[in-house]
Each structure stands twice: as structure tokens, then as C-alpha cells.
Image (spheres, helix red, strand yellow):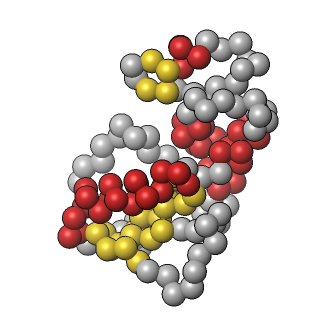
């Protein structure tokens, strides 16, 4: 079996991530073109790595992430924190990054985002896999 990486990306960042993958992997990555036009809400960009692994980019619906956690769309500010939860916004946006960003909460709904998979291994952005 081959390895498949599912990456969830806010729609406004999709082109940036696609370009970053092309730049990072160069000749070792090929974008798989789809024959039919894709629905932008559910579209998946597919990339094949030279090693036969796949990278699938999924558009991330922030409301889908926030709702199960008890946040309504109007409660969540751009920085990803709630104005009503009493959390100091500055504490969540430190030199280590924006800890209140929606990307940090996707791990809690992966089972809903990928229901067809029996197992999912979550790797955070600062994980290095060697071998």
C-alpha cells in the first residue's frame, strides 16, 4: 500500500499551498489533473510524489471545525479566538504563532472530515519524519 497525506487548507490559502508544494518538491511532484471540473467547496487537489505517495489538498471549511467545539461563525474572529470566551487574544497569538487559528483545531474533527478512513495519524507542522 502507498502512503497518502491529507492536507486541509483554507480556500484563501489553496493556491499558496499548491505553489509551495511545487517549489519544495520540484521535479519529484506531479499534480494529478481531474477530467471533470471540481466543485470548489469539495475539490481535492491531488499530487503524486516520485515515491508513489499521494498528497491530497482538501478545502477547509472553518465553520465545520468551529461548530462542534461550541463556536458560532459570528463568535469567531479572524484570529480564530472567541470574543465571548474570556481568553486573552494576546496569549493565543505569541511569538510561537497563533494558537487560536482554526488549523490547530482540525485534529479534533478529523474523524468527521475523513469518515472513510479507519485510521488517521495526525502530524503537526513541526514534526519531521525521517526514513
- Residue 95 is left or right of residue 45, and the answer is left
Residue 39 at least partly seen: yes
Q: Where is residue 6 in the image (x, y as percent from the top left)?
A: 49, 59
Residue 118 at least partly seen: no
Picture layout, residue 86 above or below residue 103: above
Residue found 40% across the figure and 23% down from its top: 96
Q: Position of residue 39 (x, y in %)?
A: 64, 72
Q: Which of 95 and 121 is in front in this view?
A: 95
- Residue 103 is left or right of residue 124, and the answer is right
Q: In which quarter of the image is residue 37?
A: bottom right
- Residue 108 is left or right of residue 52, and the answer is right
Rendered-image quadrant of the N terminus: bottom left
Residue found 34% across the figure and 59% down from its top: 19
How many discs appear? 0
Residue found 52% across the figure and 26% down from its top: 99
Rendered-image quadrant of the C terminus: bottom left
Q: Nearer the viewer, residue 50 or 74?
A: 74
Amino acid at each position: 500500500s502507498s502512503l497518502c497525506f491529507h492536507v486541509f487548507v483554507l480556500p484563501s490559502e489553496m493556491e499558496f499551498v499548491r505553489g509551495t508544494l511545487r517549489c519544495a518538491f520540484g521535479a519529484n511532484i506531479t499534480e494529478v489533473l481531474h477530467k471533470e471540473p471540481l466543485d470548489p467547496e469539495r475539490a481535492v487537489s491531488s499530487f503524486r510524489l516520485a515515491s508513489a505517495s499521494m498528497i491530497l489538498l482538501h478545502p477547509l471549511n472553518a465553520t465545520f471545525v468551529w461548530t462542534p467545539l461550541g463556536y458560532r461563525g459570528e463568535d469567531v474572529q479572524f484570529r480564530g479566538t472567541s470574543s465571548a470566551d474570556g481568553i486573552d487574544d494576546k496569549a493565543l497569538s505569541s511569538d510561537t504563532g497563533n494558537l487560536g487559528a482554526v488549523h490547530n483545531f482540525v485534529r479534533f474533527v478529523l474523524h468527521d472530515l475523513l469518515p472513510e478512513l479507519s485510521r488517521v495519524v495526525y502530524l503537526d507542522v513541526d514534526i519531521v519524519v525521517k526514513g
